[in-house]
Amino acid sequence: MQPRPNHGSQPVFCTIVPPHLLDKLSQADDPVLAEPARRTLEADGARRHHRRVTALARTPGARASSDPVPAKPHRTLYDCRHGTDLPGVKARDEGDEPTGDASVNRAYAGLGATFDLLLTEYGRSSIDGKGLPLIGSVHYDEKYNNAFFDGEQMVFGDGDGEIFLDFTVAIDVIAHELAHGLTQYTANLAYQGQSGALNESVSDVFGSLVKQYSLGQSADQGDWLIGAGLLAPRVSGVALRSMKAPGTAYDDDVLGKDPQPASMDDYVETDEDNGGVHINSGIPNRAFYLLATALGGNAWERAGRIWFDVLTGGELAQDASFRDFAMLTVAAARHRFGEGDEAEAVLKAWSEVGVPTR
Ligand SMILES: [Zn+2]
């Protein structure tokens, strides 16, 4: 058994719906809206604390280095049947026919699409590069308004049906959470401040890339939204976050307004949310969107490749700032594509969001 490459920083416990949003929702006058949000916040808080104690001691799915690296995913889906014991009852194993449960089938497909993009486009077998089995549990808890990756597996709630719907409906959410695993096994960006916002942004980037890849969309066809389809019809909003226009994903009586900045001019200094990791991620998110759409074609081919190279290249510090990351993307673009359009477009994208590249 090999230890997980965690270089001493706190393990990431990312929930796709950030605490600041659930906090707002828990203050709603209507208990039908406030109660599930309050319970979700409480459960997430307890789980966050629990993880600090246990996560580093666990070594899931470790393989001997002599084993061949698998070229196929190994997915197992479980059904929590609205309880909180993980992983739950086995519902679909790799290669099984689809079940009668749409949540199970969507999660299975989402894990498969993420594996497929990593292997086919970037030559990486699963999130650890060694074919790590992918595990997901659906129907977690009652009216649970979140989805998360706990360092070992994916977990999806059904939502309360009032504000949030079933969290398996958004393939980018599935890929976002798995991408936290990819980061954990590579750059291991510390989940605080700018490096934490980069950690979040990298997950949004690969979340969106997996969605576009699975739909066969070019950069100009992608919606560049995170969590489209997750918000119930009563909510005034289109998604949890917008990469193309951070700050515009929702503006709602109950949820408030999307707090993401689109450039460094509006950078948010806060102690909440690990220093605004789900807030300031809007800045590198938009830089990626600007790059991908400037280059055109499939976003995962050039823009995605540059980001993947930085994440896995070994030079990205765990406490990297936006500027550190931006400088490495310029170097990665030159290294892979030479002094061409790509490097120019990378410089321009960061300049537009106000992040220096030198
Ligand atoms: Zn996240």
Image (cartoon, rainbow, N blue to C red):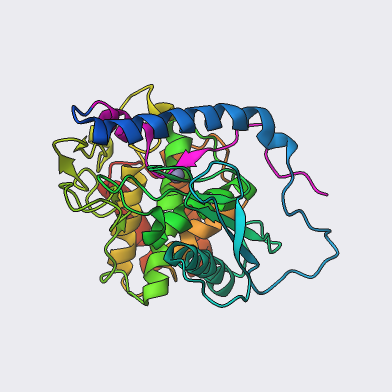
Q: How many marks?
A: 0
Give percent across and percent down for residue 352: 25, 48
Q: Is residue 320 left or right of residue 57?
A: left
Q: Is residue 100 left or right of residue 292?
A: right
Q: Is residue 80 visible?
A: yes
Q: Is residue 95 above or below residue 264?
A: below
Q: Is residue 322 above or below residue 288?
A: above
* 2 within the magenta span: yes
Q: Is residue 343 visible?
A: no
Quadrant field for ligand 1: top left
Q: Is residue 75 above or below residue 269?
A: below
Quarter of the rendering containing residue 71: bottom right
Which secondary structure is most common in the magenta stretch?
loop
* 21 within the magenta span: yes
Residue at 27% from the left image edge and 39% from the top image edge: 260
Viewer-side residue, 352 vs 298: 298
Q: Is residue 225 left or right of residue 195?
A: left
Q: Is residue 162 above or below residue 270?
A: below
Give percent across and percent down for residue 276: 37, 31
Give percent across and percent down for residue 184: 60, 46
Q: Quadrant of the C terminus?
A: top left
Give percent across and percent down for residue 122: 56, 68
Viewer-side residue, 238 vs 7: 238
**Start-end of magenta stretch:** 1-27
